[in-house]
Image: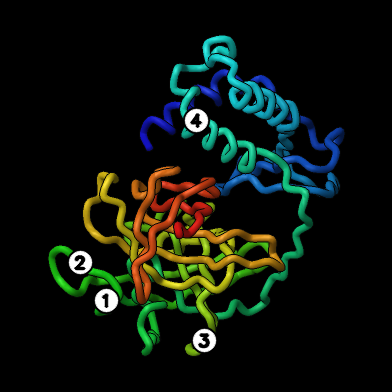
Amino acid sequence: MQGELAHVSELTRDCALLGEIEPVNSATGNVFTLNMSVDAPPHITTRLDSKGQSDSIRFFHTHKLIEHLLFMLAKLESGTPPAALGLPAAAAEPEYRHLLHHLINSWGMPHLRRFNRYSIQPNNIELGLGLRTIHALLGNTETTSVNDDTFIEITMNSFALPEHSSRNHYLAKWQILNNSAQGHALRTKGTPPAHIKVGELIAMRESEGNQWDLCVIKWIKNIDTGTVEIGVQLLPPHARPVSVYNPLSPIKNVQPGMLFPENNILKQENLLLVPHGIYMRNVRMDMITDTSRIIMPGKLVLQTQSFDLFEFNIEP
């Protein structure tokens, strides 16, 4: 992933002048809003009201930047050599095109409307962090409930562990601040887990007995000492724990995975989520449920430092 960060840094340096900063009194809709006086990520604004805006507010347009990235992506996919576009040799690899897709989604303007609902009194939820924790939670017939922030030990029988049969997993009470059709903002007080990071997988539910919703962390914000907020994006529903094995990957033992079955209503293909490093396009691998099946990985849908989510077909 260090190489990806280097590519993002290069693209940011080379394309920065395509971004446009506009003063408050002349900006139009669909911009990123930056508050220079607080430690907070930018947010997308579709309707602007310049009245009462402070001097620390800046509006940032990315339309020309996205058009340029789309142009480069189309050229690479049509076979144009990277050197002809001023790109490094690594741009010829599929991973670079996946990175461009990710940046276009992250730096672009979504066309979906957002309907945020803010809670006057934030509701408590249960939150599990990391693929192994979530695999254990969804794989256990008896789920575990917690009363406060704590580390609990969950015995995991659904896949083999090389060293021991149980590990410590993070399952804690958080607060949900607001939610929308696309995701949620969550908050915790106290010391958050050291391994929480952008791109990590979480599971959340409002109460014991409810279905777990899987999400990916999109941003993290430190409000003050002992208070952390995160923004999460919802993944498809009805995830099922499975085990996966790819003998050609650097990870040689059986690993946990999450199956998102095909959903015709959502026009969603079969999706599989695995630890980062397991996925190899067009390289057969084993998916283990009650029986073992050979699958052929296809299009990569989402990639983070923690996991890969991709489409697949079951081999006959």
Find the distance from the CA under tag 2 to the CA under tag 1.
Answer: 8 Å
Q: Secondary structure at mark 2?
A: loop
In this rendering, would 290 be left or right of 111?
A: left
**Residue type at the position of mark 2:** Leu
First in residue order: circle 2 vs circle 3:
2
Q: Does residue 186 lie above or below 171 as drawn?
A: above
Q: Quadrant of residue 253?
A: bottom left
Check whether the beta carbons of the residues at disc 2 and disc 1 lie within 8 A of each other. yes
Tell me where residue 141 appears, x and y as whole percent: 38, 88
**Residue type at the position of mark 4:** Tyr
Q: Quadrant of residue 288?
A: bottom left
Q: Which mark is residue 259?
A: none
* Residue marked by disc 3: 207
Q: Does residue 120 lie above or below 36 as drawn?
A: below
In this rendering, would 163 be left or right of 126?
A: left
Q: Around disc 4, counting alpha carbons within 10 Å, would you say few (fewer than 14), some (14 to 19), or many (20 or more)?
A: some
